[in-house]
């Protein structure tokens, strides 16, 4: 059995991320907007013709709640071991890393080298943590001149 190629994995990441973000939207809609409704769906929400401010608010709530950021990780770490949600933390870290991957892909596709360079610090940490030191060293060598 061979490993999947780059294009296959690239597509998997994008599709899985879309599915997860849609699931986050459904959870937030059931919690915030349609709590009194039995069927929570994006279609029902769209039919209510929400204003842009509400869409932005829900989007920001999703990022705060489901994407790992420094403050949120600290809050999880200070909880007693029995109250920590390891699976939720791992998913939030996954969401963060894959959103950053998609962000990097978009930067490359539009040719924005400044945007690409701005993302390197995160990827240096990822390469270091996963033992991919040759990538980490290559990035550092190119940009430390």
Image: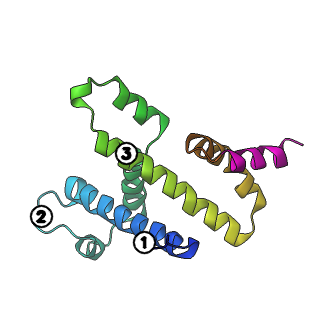
Figure check: 92 above or below 74: below
Q: Secondary structure at mark 1?
A: helix
Q: Which residue is mark 1?
A: 15
Left-right relation of 70 to 76: right
Q: Secondary structure at mark 3?
A: helix
Find residue 79 and report its image quarter: top left
- The earlier-in-sequence mark between 1 and 2 is 1
Task: Specify whether residue 129 is painted magenta.
Answer: no
The crowding category of the residue bearing disc 3, from other C-alpha atoms within 10 Å (few below 14, some 14 to 19, many at least 20), is few
- The earlier-in-sequence mark between 3 and 1 is 1
Which residues are drawn in magenta?
Answer: 133-145
Q: Quadrant of the C terminus?
A: top right
Q: Which residue is mark 2?
A: 37
Marks 3 and 1 close (CB-CB < 8 Å):
no
Q: Position of residue 133 (x, y in %)?
A: 67, 44
Distance (Cα) linking label 2 and label 3: 30 Å
Question: Relative to the observer, which residue lies in front, 44 or 119?
Answer: 119
Distance (Cα) linking label 3 and label 1: 18 Å
Q: Give the residue drawn at x 30%, y 74%.
A: 46
Q: Position of residue 16 (x, y in %)?
A: 40, 67
Tell me the mark number nearer the camera, choosing from 1 and 2. 1
Q: Which residue is mark 3?
A: 90
- The earlier-in-sequence mark between 2 and 3 is 2
Task: Specify whether residue 137 is painted magenta.
Answer: yes
Find residue 73 and report its image quarter: top left
Q: Secondary structure at mark 2?
A: loop
């Amino acid at each position: 059995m061979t490993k999947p190629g780059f294009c296959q994995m690239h597509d998997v990441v994008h599709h899985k991320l879309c599915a997860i973000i849609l699931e986050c939207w459904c959870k937030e809609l059931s919690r915030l907007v349609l709590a009194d409704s039995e069927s929570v769906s994006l279609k029902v929400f769209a039919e209510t013709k929400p204003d842009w401010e509400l869409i932005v608010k829900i989007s920001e709530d999703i990022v705060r709640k489901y994407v790992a950021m420094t403050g949120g990780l600290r809050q999880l770490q200070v909880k007693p071991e029995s109250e920590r949600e390891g699976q939720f933390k791992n998913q939030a870290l996954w969401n963060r890393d894959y959103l950053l991957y998609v962000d990097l892909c978009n930067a490359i596709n539009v040719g924005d080298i400044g945007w690409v360079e701005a993302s390197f610090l995160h990827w240096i940490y990822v390469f270091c943590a996963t033992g991919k030191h040759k990538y980490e060293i290559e990035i550092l060598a190119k940009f430390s001149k």
